[in-house]
Amino acid sequence: MKLVFATNNKNKIKEIKLLLDDSIELLSLEDINCTEGIPETSDTIAGNALQKARYVFDNYGCNCFADDTGLEIDSLNGAPGIYSARYAGEKKSADANMDKVLTKLKHINNRKAHFKTVIALIISGKEALFEGIAKGKITTIKSGSEGFGYDPIFKPEGYNVTFSEMSLEKKNKISHRGIAVRKLAKHLTSL
């Protein structure tokens, strides 16, 4: 089955390919010549995922899925949340985003946080949502060279290393995106 993943983020594509069955031919937005910016104007993570999937399905006629992820920090009232990718500005700099979080938490003891991913799937017009949550805490410094986004400052519950210090295979077993993708994969095998 051909399935478009509504992203051009090569890191996300790499992570998800490892979790999907070989019978799924995963395509990116680039593969279907979708070069325009897809709107993300919802005030929820699930709403943004649905908006992206509907855009691809409605404009390109492809079975597809889209994800949206947010880092929600307890002591920042859930921020950065839906603004995670552009928390420090529209340039979407991971380093600037992490620096802003670390600065805001500099004198705060409660560093509890969680990542939430929602995947919206549309096949032949039928929609389904899959959610994954990874609980943990924000570190005081960046650590590790793997992964992307906030991975160098997020230490998942039960681990003494950040997502960025884990192999991709290990991270996929416990991450928010890994949990959501496994739910997606299970659903796809039932079709």
Image (cartoon, helix red, strand yellow):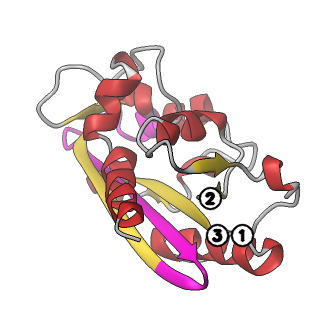
Q: Nearer the viewer, residue 29 or 114?
A: 29
Instruction: Please tell me which residue is depicted at 48% across the width and 26% down the height of the picture.
Output: 147
Distance from Cα at disc 2 to Cα at disc 3: 5 Å
Relative to 35, 112 lies left or right? left
Classed neighbour count for the residue bearing mark 3: other residues with Cα under 10 Å, few (<14), some (14–19), many (≥20): many
Q: Amino acid at mark 2?
A: Leu
- Residue 90, image x, y percentages: 74, 50
The tag on residue 62 is 1
Give the structural element (helix, strand or loop) at label 1.
loop
Q: Is residue 31 covered in magenta?
A: no
Mark before the other along the chain sequence, 2 or 3: 2
Instruction: Please tell me which residue is depicted at 57% across the width and 64% down the height of the picture.
Output: 65
Instruction: Please tell me which residue is depicted at 28% across the width and 48% down the height of the picture.
Output: 113
Residue 163 seen by the camera: yes
Q: Is residue 104 covered in magenta?
A: yes
Q: Which residue is mark 3?
A: 63
Q: Residues at badges 3 and 1 in contact (C-beta under 8 Å)?
A: yes
The tag on residue 53 is none
- Residue 163, image x, y percentages: 35, 28
Q: Residues at badges 2 and 3 in contact (C-beta under 8 Å)?
A: yes
Region rendered in magenta: 101-127
Residue 139 seen by the camera: no
Q: Amino acid at mark 3?
A: Asn
Give the structural element (helix, strand or loop) at label 3.
loop
Give the structural element (helix, strand or loop) at label 2.
strand
Distance from Cα at disc 3 to Cα at disc 1: 4 Å
Q: Residues at badges 2 and 1 in contact (C-beta under 8 Å)?
A: yes
The tag on residue 3 is 2
Classed neighbour count for the residue bearing mark 2: other residues with Cα under 10 Å, few (<14), some (14–19), many (≥20): some
